[in-house]
Image (cartoon, rainbow, N blue to C red):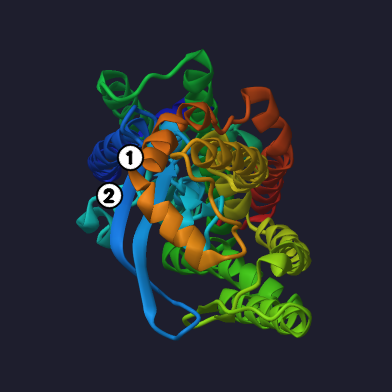
Amino acid sequence: MVWLIAKKEFHDNWISYKILLAFALCIILVTVSVGLALKDYSERLSSYSLAHSGDGFFLDRIANYVFLNAEGSDNRGDIVDAIGVYRRPAELSVFARGLEDRMNRPVRFLDIRKIGAQVQVYTRNKQERNKLFALFSPPDFLFITKVMLSLLTILFAFSAIAGERESGTLKLMLSNSISRGQVLLGKFLGGYASLAAPFLAAALIALLLVALSPSMALDSGGWMRILLLTLVSLVYIAVFFFIGLAVSALARRSATAVVLLLAIWVVLALVVPNVGWLVAKRVIEVPSQQQIETEKFKTARQIEDETEKKYPSHTNMPGYGQYHVEAQDEIRKAMVGIEEGYEILRRKRLALSQILTRLSPVGSYVYATAGLAQTGIEDEKRYDSQLKQNEAQMSVEVKRMFDDAFSGAGRESPPPREDLHAYRAWLVKNDEYVYGNFRSGYSEMQNLTFGKSSLLETLHTIRLDLLLLVIWMGLGFVSATLAVVKCEVR
């Protein structure tokens, strides 16, 4: 009898065009989304490949840099910059973009504007991207499943029990030797299959697009991640379907059921994820980046002014003031201390917001899916940790290159760096030799990479979210069972 009920439910969804609508929406949205995401991934991969090629370090010479000398007039000289080292784009970002853009920031290796070896990280992505894609970013696979499929469950579930009660067929079914548990199971199997079939068809098309894309080169681990991502999505759909069956059993009319389900969807999909972050921001306040930079500037100026009393400087940098080479180590340590203090606050706020957003199955689904795509929060933490390690390694390498290049530039030895004006004049005079040595020395730094988490590491980091999704599904099943047991037939 369970299979008869399931077949009837599937047939009813078919003749009402619900399944056809689901097929059309899933296939069109997923195909367009993955297709555009693959195009964007190809462009980002090209930028990454260029950054790791022989011409990948973008050396720019700008001849209009001005700084003031002791007499107040200006000197001009070349600036040499070296830009490179990106994190290789995550292949599965075509399914879940997540925090991918935050993990593709280039690193500036050298900046002679400060007369020395500098390593700086850009705060925004410099890789070439389609501007229209940035303005009108299409929803990714994660967004489509999170929003559209959860809404479709309302379409399939709101009348599953309430509609049978209104038409009188529920009373007829229960008058035979059919238990209410069998009715629930049959309704779930038929309705869930009606929704899962379009989803799996769209997922299969997405897999074909990925397999045929020349820019994608997934290993067995990548395909396993896609399989797990699909299974997690099916569990997520089941959660909302059980919720829909529970409300449909409790509501006396289908119209009431659909209104209640829309309200529940708004709370779970929109209110809880957004309010969780807002509450966390309110509870744990962190200054804006502009305020932090202002504090850094004031701290640096205070150290410079104290140093000025001991070692008067004749170097005035526009917009900054007196510059002291002797104070730079102390300033760097102070900057690190300020940033680390605020980083602790950021992590506490993030941890609280994650706890609050996990009060909805949407939160756990997003964290689990982004983690499988290697674009989640833990992946960004891993990236930041490796970025700091690479920064330290690059700083040592750049200093070595700097010293090696300058030690052999001509017969004349370079003046002390404390005398910035003489040092600048020497640098410009020996520019071609120094520039050539810099360019030839970047091959070592080209080998620096950003490792990504293995599948086992990913499963370890998302284990809580996977467990919560299973718990949500279990709670939905229990709620639907109790609702069907207690529902009135008339």
Front-lying residue, 258 or 471: 471
The residue lying at 68 percent from left, 76 percent from top is: 300
Give neighbour class at mark 1: few <14, some 14-19, many 20+ (Cα, 10 Å): many
Q: Which residue is drawn at 79% across and 80% down?
A: 310
Residue type, label 2: Arg
- First-in-chain label (2 vs 1): 1
Establish if 285 lies above or below 2.
Answer: below
For the residues bearing labels 2 and 1, Cβ distance under 8 angstroms: yes
- Compared across the picture, whether 229 is left or right of 12 comes to right
Between 123 and 405, the one lying in front of the other is 405
Q: Quadrant of residue 31?
A: top left
Q: Which residue is drawn at 55% across and 76% down?
A: 315
Q: In the displayed structure, does residue 371 sit left or right of residue 300? A: left
Q: Is residue 97 among the parts visible in the rendering?
A: yes
Asked if residue 410 is positioned above or below residue 254 in the image, the reply reads above
User: Which residue lies at the image location 50% right of the left edge and 24% below the top edge?
Assistant: 227
Residue 349: percent from left, percent from top: 72, 66
Q: Percent position (x, y) of residue 421?
A: 49, 67
Question: Tag 1: residue type?
Answer: Arg
Depth check, front residue: 457 or 73: 73
In this figure, which residue is indicated by the disc labeled 1?
A: 44
Element assignment for label 1: helix
Quadrant for the C terminus, please.
bottom right
Residue located farthest toward the front when viewing the structure as drawn:
411
Could you tell me which secondary element the residue under label 2 belongs to?
loop
In the image, taking residue 412 as reference, residue 298 lies left or right, namely: right
Circle number at residue 129? 2
